[in-house]
Amino acid sequence: MAFPSFLSVFLIHITLFVSLCFAGDPFVNYDFVVSYITASPLGVPQQVIAINDKFPGPNINVTTNNNVVVNVRNKLDESLLITWSGIQQRRSSWQDGVLGTNCPIPSKWNWTYQFQVKDQIGSFFYFPSLNFQRASGGYGGFVINNRAIIPIPFATPDGDITILIGDWYTRNHTALRKALDAGKDLGMPDGVLINGKGPYRYNDTLVPDGIDYETIEVHPGKTYRLRVHNVGVSTSLNFRIQNHNLLLAETEGSYTVQQNYTSLDIHVGQSYSFLVTMDQNASTDYYIVASARFVNESLWKRVTGVAILHYTNSKGKAKGPLPDSPNDEFDKTFSMNQARSIRWNVSASGARPNPQGSFRYGSINVTDIYVLKNKPPVMINGKRRMTLSGVSYVNPSTPIRLADQFKVKGVYKLDFPTRPLTGPPRMEASVINGTYRGFMEVILQNNETKVQSYHMNGYAFFVVGMDYGEWTENSRGTYNKWDGIARSTAQVYPGAWTAILISLDNVGVWNLRTENLDSWYLGQETYVRVVNPEDTNKTELPIPDNALFCGALNKMQKPQDISSAISIMGNRSKLFSTLLTIVCAMISILR
C-alpha cells in the first residue's frame, strides 16, 4: 500500500503545482549573510555591518503581491533582527523583525523571513532593529514595483537609482550604545554618508584627501527615478542636486501630486522617489548634496554628504561652492510648509494598502484618540530615559505576540494612556489596545528641541495636519480631509504637533516608535495591539514553523545545528520554486 499512498501524495502535489502555475503569486528568494567588515567611509578604519560583504547591503527588488523569502545568517557577535521599514506585513506580524513580535536571531544562527508584499508599491528600506546596529550599517533599499497591468502615473523612467543618505559616527554602534547607557548625548556626527561613502572633496579644509565618494553616472536627456532614504541615526537632511529639479513622484508607497523642488528635507526614516531629468549641458559634473538641517551650520559644516552626478559626456569635474540649502534660520515654517505641500495623488492607479474606499478617510468615524507627547530626557530609577506620554518603554524578555499566542501572563500591560500622564514618568511595557477595524487618531506632540520622526510598522497612515504650538480640539479644523499623504513615517517639528489617522485593519502587534535611534534606544516607543475577536487565519497567518522562542518560552526552543547553519524553510522555498518552474515549463510544452 506504500506505493499508492506515495502516488496519491505525488498527484496532490502536482495538482497544487499546476494551480500555482496559473494562479499563484511568485516567490522571490534572497540570502543575507550579516557580518562585520572593516571600512573607512570617513577616512578612519572602523567596524561596519555588511550584508553579503557589502555596505550598504543589496537592494531587494520585487513586484506587488510577490512572496518574499529572505534567509538571514547572523555572523555578528550579538543577536540580530531585520525589520522592513514601511513594508506592511499584511496578516503577518510574525515576520516584522522587532522585539514586540520576534525573538532575536542568536549569533551564528540562521532564520528565514517569509512574507507577501500584498497590495503595495513604492520605495522602502530594511535595517537591523536591535542594539543600535543601524548606526553601523546593515541597511539596504527595498523596491516594490507595480504589476505590469497597473500603469504608473508617469512615463517609464530610463533608470532606477537607490540613494541611501544618513548621518554617521566613526564610533561603532557598541560605543554609541555605551555612551547612551552612561547617560551621555551622542554629540555631533562625524559626517554624512551617501550610499555608504564619504564626501567628495569639494573643500580641501573640511574634507580630507583620499576619501572614497559615490559617483552616479547618467546619460544626457534621460529621466531617472531616484529613490532617496534617510537611514541615519538622528539628523534631518536636506537633499539637493546642483542645477537639477527634483520632481517628487512617490513616498513610502503612495504616489504624490507631482511637484518640483530645488531641495527637500528628508527626516530620519523617510523615503522619497524623485524623477530627475538630465537636462544640463554637462560642462562639468554636478554635486549631489545631503546636509544637516535645524543645526548651527557654522559648526556642522563637516556634517555634509557630497556625491557626484556624472554625465557620460561630462567635460570636467564638479567645481564651485555647493548649492545652497534653504536659508530659513529665522523662518521655522519653511520646512513645515514644504511638508504640507506633499499631497496624495488620489487618482493614480496602483496598489492601495488601505481598505477599499479609505481614500475618503475624512468621512470615516474615529474610534480611538491618543495624544502622544515626548519631552526632553528624564531620570527614572537613576537612568536617563526618553518617554512617550510619560511612559518609557522597556522590552519584555518574551515578545508580546508570542505571549499572546501561548497565553503567558504578566508580560505587558494593555494600559497605555490616551493622554499624557500627569504623575511621575515610569518604565514599563505599556501597550496601546487597538480596536480591530477601528479608525485611530494619533496626535504626536514634540516638546523636545529637535525634529522627531515617528514610524508605525504594519500600516500606512494618513498625515492630516501639523502646526506649531500645542494641539487642541480646535486644531482639527486645520486637517486636510481629502488628499493628505498616506505613508509610514512622519516628522514632528520641535514645539509642534503632527496628526495622523490609522485604519486598524491589519491584525497583529505593531511597533509605534521614533526613528531617531538615540530616542528609540532610550524608550520612546510603544506597540499597538490589534486583535480580531474572531479566531480565524483569514485575518492573521498562523505562527510560522520556524518561530524562535525566548524569555518565558525559552524551553520550547530547539537547538540549531550550527555546523550546517542551513535554514530548512529557506531551502524548502527554493526547492518549491525550482520544482514549480520545472512543472510549469513541462505544462507549457504539453499545451
Image (tube, rainbow, N blue to C red):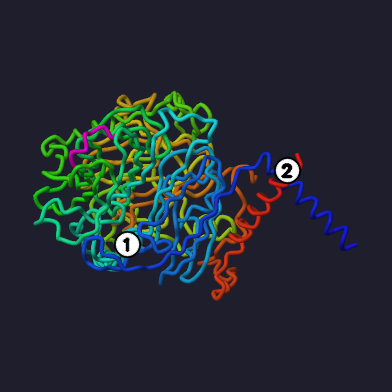
Classed neighbour count for the residue bearing mark 1: other residues with Cα under 10 Å, few (<14), some (14–19), many (≥20): many
Q: Do the residues under discs 1 and 2 have CB atoms within 8 angstroms? A: no
Q: How many marks?
A: 2
Residue 238 at x, y = what percent?
22, 42
Residue 188 at x, y = what percent?
18, 57
Nearest the eye: 167 or 522: 167
What amino acid type is highlighted by mark number 1? Answer: Ser
Q: Quadrant of residue 118?
A: top right
Q: Residue furthest right?
A: 1
Dot 2 falls on a residue whose secondary structure is helix
Query: Eyeballing the image, is 395 above or below 236?
Result: below
Residue receiving disc 1: 136
Query: Eyeballing the image, is 136 above or below 276?
Result: below
Alpha carbon separation for disc pair 1 and 2 = 50 Å
Please say whether residue 238 is visible from this viewpoint. Answer: yes
What amino acid type is highlighted by mark number 2? Answer: Ile
Q: Quadrant of the N terminus?
A: bottom right
Q: Quadrant of residue 4?
A: bottom right
Query: Eyeballing the image, is 469 above or below 136?
Result: above
Residue pictured at 11% horizontal, 56% vertical: 206
- The magenta segment is 278-284
**Magenta stretch mostly in which secondary structure?**
loop
Please say whether residue 382 is visible from this viewpoint. Answer: no
Residue receiving disc 2: 589
Specify whether 304 is left or right of 443: left
Specify whether 28 is left or right of 176: right
Indicate which label's residue lies in the foreground, 1 or 2.
2
Residue 25 at x, y = what percent?
61, 43
Residue 18 at x, y = what percent?
73, 44
Nearest the eye: 414 or 404: 404
Classed neighbour count for the residue bearing mark 2: other residues with Cα under 10 Å, few (<14), some (14–19), many (≥20): few
